[in-house]
Amino acid sequence: MSKSSIRDTFFEECEDLLEALMEGLTELEDNPGDDEIVNAVFRAVHSIKGGAGAFGLDDLVSFAHTFETVLDMVRDKTLFIDPDLMRIFNRSGDKLTDLVEAARDGTEIDTVSRDAVMNELEQYLSDQPEEEIAFAAAPLDFAPAPLDADEPDLPPFEPESAASDAGPNVFRIVFVPTAELYTHGHEPLLIIDHLAKLGQVEVALDISDVPAFSQIDNLDYPGWTIRLTTENPMPAVEAVFEFVEGLCQISIVDEADMPGLPPIQPPAPPPVIERPKASPLQSATPQKDKEREQKGPKATLRVDLERVDRLINNVGELIINQAMISQCIEELNLPPTSQIFNEIEDYKLLARDIQEGVMAIRAQPVKPLFQRMARIVREASEATGKQARFLTVGENTEIDKTVIERLADPLTHMIRNAVDHGLESADKRLAAGKDEMGTIRLTAAHRSGNVILEIADDGAGINRAAVQRKAVEKGLISADAELTESEIDNLLFAPGFSTATEVSNLSGRGVGMDVVKTAVAKLGGRISVGSVQGEGTTFSIILPLTLAVMDGFVVSIADQTMVVPISSILETVSAASGDIQIMGQAERLLRLRGRYIPIVNVAHSLALQVPEPVENPIYLIVESEPQGLCALEIGEIHDQRQIVVKSLDSDFGTIAGISAATILGDGKIALILDTDEISRGAAPQSLDTLSLIQNADFQDV
Amino acid sequence: MSDTAELTVDETQEFVTFSAGNQVFCIKITQIREIRRWAPVTALPHTPPDVLGVMNLRGSVIPIIDLSARFGLGRTEPQERNVVIIVIDGDRSVGMLVQSVSEILSVTAEQIQDTSDVRATSSAYYITGIISHEKQMIRVIDLAAVLHGRS
């Protein structure tokens, strides 16, 4: 393994650790007193620090160290979590994420904001003497071991407890392993652990014989003195050491026989490490551990994405091959009773199963994405001074990895908008009788083969009068246009639209919801908005589960067979001649239920040679930005089927009007139309239909 | 394709010769994945005339170029003997339509006349060398230059 691949692994692990960290911080907000969560957060930060140290990432190490130290104070109960500290923890988590990313990509770090967070953290340290902090980091290596009673650092016995009653036996065990014990693969910890199962143990490590570090050549120096209080008789205790007999010096003495033994004591002066004691509810602890185990990560496998994609590609071929075979068999005109039809049906189902299984490998929970959004909410609410609570629902919903990656930007934008424009200021909220703190809710769910994401705020809702006024101002609609509520809401997606009268540096950066809409459309999805006055606004994004397979119409355009994604088609129309009107020189409009929709001849816009004009063309009604509705003229629709998307070679750059290709049942390649791009060849159309087509922006590409 | 012409003196290498635009060319056999009979391809809109389109090679969509057109020697006329040479270009494949494939040549480095001195200024920048074989002049192609342009 080369160093760079170890480094890659480190950063992959960092992603998991950061996820655990942010998850822990979120949980901590609800359960500020939970030691286990604090420990989990601490471990995550510490592991990142440890890894970063190995790669000499000093910035990361120093920040993680400070963060970890403050966390340790929380573990030690010298510091208690309040909203202020929680806020700083969250910001530290964000900063740590930034630093990890900067280290991974080798980019510059924003030292100003890092130092700001660092200073805030350090303020908590100022009352804390340095040495203690240095020691405080020590116990973490023990922390993951689920041992409760055998910590090597228990305080000396109380004399009272030593004077045992008649009840349980108390054994004094001196256990000094030899080097052989270790070379045989035994582990003293496991033995002590075993003893702990018999009863209560108190352990002291004798390190007086341990030589200086430079002289250590064997491991047979340290020994333990263990005081075991148990119901079990001597033989049961001896049995624990059965397997290490001859590999260690062992003496087991019943304290009842040897009164006056000195209490066992840790060697002087070890670092006194205060650990939060196992809670008095001993029985609760193991149960909690069990819960944690179940909740903990399932066994997973890291696989090179390329391998998965290769597999997906192969499965795509399998599907195509299956379609080809079906087609061949159909052409054989076999009697319908033939056994082969059953078999081919099984083959089809099997191929579909395999495909779904493989696609599931690429699917990932949206959780990391949602966690990033939590940060956006925090930042946005700090920047705007509006307090916002962030709720997520369905964060285990799985979506294709690529879709998740490409959702990050549009979601960020929408979340910012929700805080900046969606929520009212605190006094307005109070005046409206609402909680001062606003709520942003991000929901993900699967619904009938699609993924639905919702971004909801509990703000004032869309101010439709303002939106309409603005749209008139911007010349998007005419002043006397009568629009339905949903038409007004949809104006938000019109290009160049921004309702905030003052352009805030947060969400009014020239890109609007139209960019979000385009990004969603690129993923084969749709976006819509709903709003209730005084109660809030909800944006819904509907996405396909995967980008690799889509439903499409197989159509003929000129003499070519092509595919149009069904998700982009609103309806299909076969028009009578009277429905087509000519405007200007050659612009044609299709009349559809009283509206006139510009027609784009797809064959022309793709510069395909048309052998002869199509007799009864079909019109596919599509909607795109900024043209609005548009009718794509094609020859004929042959079929509707699921197709496997194959990206076109980038050698030719992007081809206008074509998004990708697929392979049909006969082995031929069909191009997939990019309806957005093609309808861009149409004249722009405003929302109130008739007064449209401002100027001849029309060009037949 | 950086290893195109760097041969040590004794080493022999095999080249596949073919004709395109009525000239004879060759490329190293190791750069060829397979040779297929010509079949109509799916045309791509808005592409230069030397890009014929795409074809399905066992589930992969690969581009097909007309080599003669790319060399500025005019389009390849459809013929029985036309074939597509599928070449390896990094981690993908590209098909090149040629008139016909002739034979496999074994040559040593000495037999290749280097043309790099004229190459920089010549319009035939994609030719790295010339092999003289049975009174024929066989042009050795720099595949990377053909596929990705002058570098």
Image (spheres, rainbow, N blue to C red):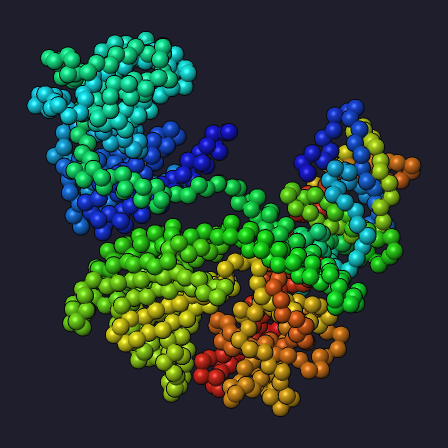
Residue A697, percent across and down? 54, 75
- The residue at 73%/45% (across/down) is B87
- The residue at 41%/19% (across/down) is A185
Residue A240, percent across and down? 32, 20
**Is residue A315 left or right of A12 when viewed as pictured?**
right
- The residue at 71%/52% (across/down) is B57
Residue lying at the far bottom of the rendered structure: A578
* Residue B74 found in image quarter: bottom right
Tell me: residue B58, above or below residue A249.
Answer: below
In this rendered view, identify the residue nearer to me: B89 or A36. Answer: A36
Tell me: residue A38, above or below residue A520.
Answer: above
- The residue at 26%/63% (across/down) is A439
Please say whether residue A223 is visible from this viewpoint: no
In this rendered view, identify the residue nearer to me: A568 or A122. Answer: A568
Residue lying at the far left of the rendered structure: A160
**Is residue A121 left or right of A404 when viewed as pictured?**
left
**Is residue A443 left or right of A148 when viewed as pictured?**
right
The quadrant of the image that shows the N terminus of chain B is top right
Tell me: residue A216, above or below residue A314.
Answer: above
Residue B72, percent across and down? 77, 53
The quadrant of the image that shows the C terminus of chain B is top right
In this rendered view, identify the residue nearer to me: A80 or A650. Answer: A80
* Residue A77 found in image quarter: top left
Disc count in the image?
0
In this rendered view, identify the residue nearer to me: B80 or A694. Answer: B80
**Is residue A84 left or right of A581 when viewed as pictured?**
left
